[in-house]
Image (tube, grey):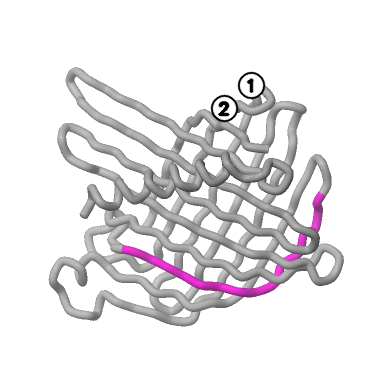
Amino acid sequence: MVERVRAGSFALAIAGWCFAASADAAQWIGKGEAGLAFANGNTESQTANARVAVTRKAENWEYSFATGGLYVRADGDTTASRWDASTQTRQDFSGRNFWHLGVRYAQDRFSGFDHQGVVTTGVGRRFVDDDRTRLLVQIGTGYKFYETLQNTMGGSDAGKAHNITFVSTVEFQHRLTDTTTLLNRFASEVNAGNTFLQNEVNVAVKMTNRLALSVAYAVRHNTDPPDTFRRTDTLTTANLVYEVK
């Protein structure tokens, strides 16, 4: 199962990257990033993470797709295996206000959940949107489904759940200098079963017109994971980024 998750994550990443690279540069923009680390000697480990994100704007519409994966293996044991994918459509209807419809799906067996998925809709506003700074806030509601590992390992159906979920997102992006950009993105999925929170801070420094070095710190929190699993996971990455524009 872990190997299928790992293969699926990088297959999606590669597919998304090929799609972005082959798309019309006048319509689609995006970026792909990846990082690798290997250690041998007293400790043997292999770490890989990748992410692809593309966006297309057409008049009052905006379409986006993102996928990413993480895989860590240390001393012969897999210690992390995660992939996720999301897509969203936005339509402007009044100045900086917009309507949105989105889907997110993730598999991360080391969080205690076999998978989590949510379909959402709502409204949002770009409070600041210029060449230097962007502040976007969106709220909405949707339908969420998830399954805990105890259920997939032979337990009862108590590990399955689906319910109405309230969602929110806050994105802040600011160009500190001509080559350095700061991005902070917070997202929440709140319901009676399990609330999922995520925040990521990212600093990207351009080396060329298309290449950049990105350093990020992400925190993921589940309020009600299965027993023996921690509520909070953190991830620090340093990746090489290639922009398609």
Q: Quadrant of residue 227?
A: bottom left
Is 125 within the magenta?
Answer: yes
The answer to which of 10 and 108 lies nearer the viewer is: 10
Secondary structure state at the residue bearing disc 2? strand
Disc 1 crowd, CA 10 A, few/some/many (<14, 14-19, 20+):
few
Give above or below for 165 relative to 36: below
Give above or below for 75 relative to 109: above
Q: Are marks 2 and 1 in contact (CB under 8 Å)?
A: yes
Residue 213 is labelled as: 2
As measured in the structure, the alpha-carbon distance from the residue carrying label 2 to the one carrying label 1 is: 7 Å
x and y, in percent, of residue 13 in the image = 44, 45
Give above or below for 224 relative to 65: below
Residue 42 is labelled as: none
Is 2 placed left or right of 235 in the picture?
left
Q: Residue at x 20, y 25 (%)?
A: 43
Which range of residues does the magenta coloring cover? 115-129
Outermost residue on the top side: it is 41
x and y, in percent, of residue 162 in the image = 39, 79
x and y, in percent, of residue 82 in the image = 35, 50
Is 151 placed left or right of 69 in the picture?
left
Q: Residue at x 34, y 51 (%)?
A: 8
Q: Where the N terminus falls, by quadrant?
A: bottom left
Q: Residue at x 60, y 66 (%)?
A: 168
Give above or below for 206 relative to 95: above
The answer to which of 119 and 162 lies nearer the viewer is: 119
Query: On the image, numbered disc 1 is attached to which residue?
Result: 207
Say what amino acid the circle numbered 1 marks: Met
Secondary structure state at the residue bearing disc 1? loop
Say what amino acid the circle numbered 2 marks: Leu
Is 65 within the magenta?
Answer: no
Q: How many marks?
A: 2
User: Is most of the magenta stretch helix, strand or loop?
Assistant: strand
